[in-house]
Amino acid sequence: MVRVVVVGAGVNGVGSALALQRLHPECQITIIAKDFTPNTTGDGAAGLWEPYRRGGGFTPDSKIVEWAGITWQQFSEWYSKGEGKTRGLSLIHGTTLNSVLEPPPSWQHIPLGYASLTPDQCAQFGPRYKSGSRYTTFIAEPSKLLPSLLRDLKALGTRLEVRCLSSLKEAADEADLVINCSGLGARDLVPDPFMFPVRGQVIRVRAPWVNQFHSDEADESFAYIVPNEWAGITWQQFSEWYSKGEGKTRGLSPIHGTTLNSVLEPPPSWQHIPLGYASLTPDQCAQFGPRYKSGFRFTTFTAEPSKLLPSLLRDLKALGTRLEVRCLSSLKEAADEADLVINCSGLGARDLVPDPFVFPVRGQVIRVRAPWVNQFHIDVADESFAYIIPNQDTVVLGGTDQKNNWNLKVDAADSRTIWANCTAHIPSLKSAEVVEEWVGLRPYRSKGVRLEADELQLGNRTIPVVHNYGHGGCGVTLFWGCSQEVARLASRLILRHHGPASKL
C-alpha cells in the first residue's frame, strides 16, 4: 500500500486528496494540517468563481483557464445532481467593473452568458468606469464546501491529522509520496521565499434583497459584494446548444431574475429545472413593496423565437425537409398528400380540427433599448401585472393577458399601462428608447395542451395524426419536450402503419 501525506487542509489540500483517493483507492492517504474547517483561511472567503488575484502573472494563462474550467465542470456536476445546498453552491448573476480599459479575460467562455459591457453600459455605474463584464457564475462557500469534501474523504477511508509540521521532511518520514498544499505555510515548509500574504478583510451582513454579485476592481474604489445563498427536456436542449457556443445563433441567453406575486403561492412544480431556484422569504418580498406576499428567483434561458426559428429552419433544410407556404382550410387537405399528419397549428387548430376549446389570449409588448437592464423581472399581481425581459438586442416590456381578445392592433391605453407598471419597477426605463410596439395572440386551450395520436378518415384511407397544440404562453418553454414526444408517437405510428423498414 502506498502511503500518501497531503500537507494542508484548505480547498486545494482537501481537493487534491479527494481526487487522488478516487483515482487510486488503494492508497492510504493522510491529510496533515494545523487547522481544518472551520478554521482555515478559505472558511472566511465568499467563494465566487472568478479567476482573480492569481499571483504575479508567472502561471501560464492556459493553465489558469484549464484549471478554472475543470473546477466549473465539477461545480456544474454537483449542482445538477441536487447537491448545491450541501456543497455550498449557488448560481448568481452579476457585474464586474474597472476604471481602466481591460480586454475580455481568457476565461470568458466558461461561465454562463459572459458579456462585455459597452461604454454606455459602464457609464450607467459612474463616469470613472471604462470597462466591465457581466455573467452568471457559481458561489462555492468554503465553509460548506470543505465539510462536504471531508465527509467524502472519510467515507473513502482518508485519515485526518491535526499537527503542526516544522518541515516537509517531517511529513516525508512517514510517507511514500508527499503532496504539498500548504498555502502560505510553504514559505517556511519548503522553504519558498516567493510566498507572501495578501491580506483580505470582509464584512458579512444580512441583506436578503441583494441577489447579484458586484465587483469593482478600480484601485480607487475597490469593492466586492457577493451574496451567499440558495433544470426538463427543453432546458437540456437549450443547455446543450449553449454549451456548444450556439447561443447567439439560436437566440439563447442565460438570465437571472425575480417573479413576484401579491398572493401567497406555493413553489411551482418545475422549480427543480432552472438553475438556482429559490423561494423568496416574506422579508425579501417586502423589499419590493408591501403588497408582495410570495415570489422566487432563478437563472433561466431566454430563447428569442426571431432567432431560434431561423436556426431550426436551417437545421431542417440541411436534413432535406421541404417548406411550403400555403393556407389550409382543414387538416384533411394536408392528409390528401401525406401518410402521417402532425398538427402543430396553434390558434389555427380552432378551425382546422376544429377544436372549440382553443381561444386567444392577447399579448401586447413594448421593445426598448436599455442595455443596462440585465435581469428579468416579472410581477404577476393582477393590479400591477408586468414583465421586463432582456433579449440580446432589446428589452421586452409587457404586457397584457386578455382572454378571447382577437385585436392585433396596438392599443394606446395598454401601452400606457405597460409603461407605467414597468417603469415603476425599474425607473431608469423612463429614459429608454422605444424600438417597437407589438401584439400577438397566445394559443390557449381550456382543456390544456393536446398532445396525442388521432386519425382522419379519407375515403377508404385512414391517416394517422399527431396533435401538438394548446401551449398558451409557454410554447418556447415546452417546445423541445413536446417535440420529442411527438417524434416518439409518430415513430410508433409509422411502425404500425408502414412496418420497420419504412422510409415513408
Image: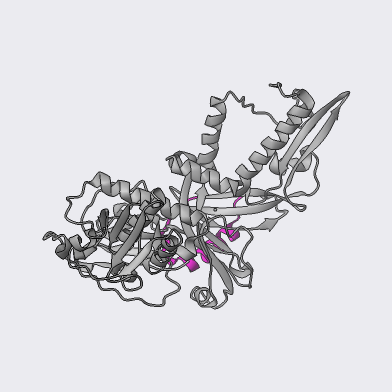
Residue 46 in view in this figure: no
- Corner quadrant of residue 327: top right
Nearer-the-camera pick, 451 or 431: 451
Nearer-the-camera pick, 155 or 222: 155
User: Which residue ends up furthest to the right in the rendered image?
Assistant: 460
Q: Position of residue 75 (x, y in %)?
A: 42, 55
Q: Position of residue 369 (x, y in %)?
A: 42, 53
Q: Position of residue 300 (x, y in %)?
A: 51, 54
Residue shown at 69% from the left, 36% from the top: 488
Nearer-the-camera pick, 267 or 201: 201
Residue shown at 74% from the left, 28% from the top: 494
Asked whether, in this view, residue 141 is left or right of residue 128, the answer is: right
Count of numbered labels shown in the rendering:
0
Quadrant location, the C terminus: top right
Residue shown at 60% from the left, 65% from the top: 380
Residue 150 in view in this figure: yes
> Residue 503 magenta-drawn?
no
> Residue 432 magenta-drawn?
yes
Q: Position of residue 68 (x, y in %)?
A: 33, 51
Residue shown at 68% from the left, 41% from the top: 485
- Corner quadrant of residue 349: top right
Which residues lie in the magenta part? 408-436
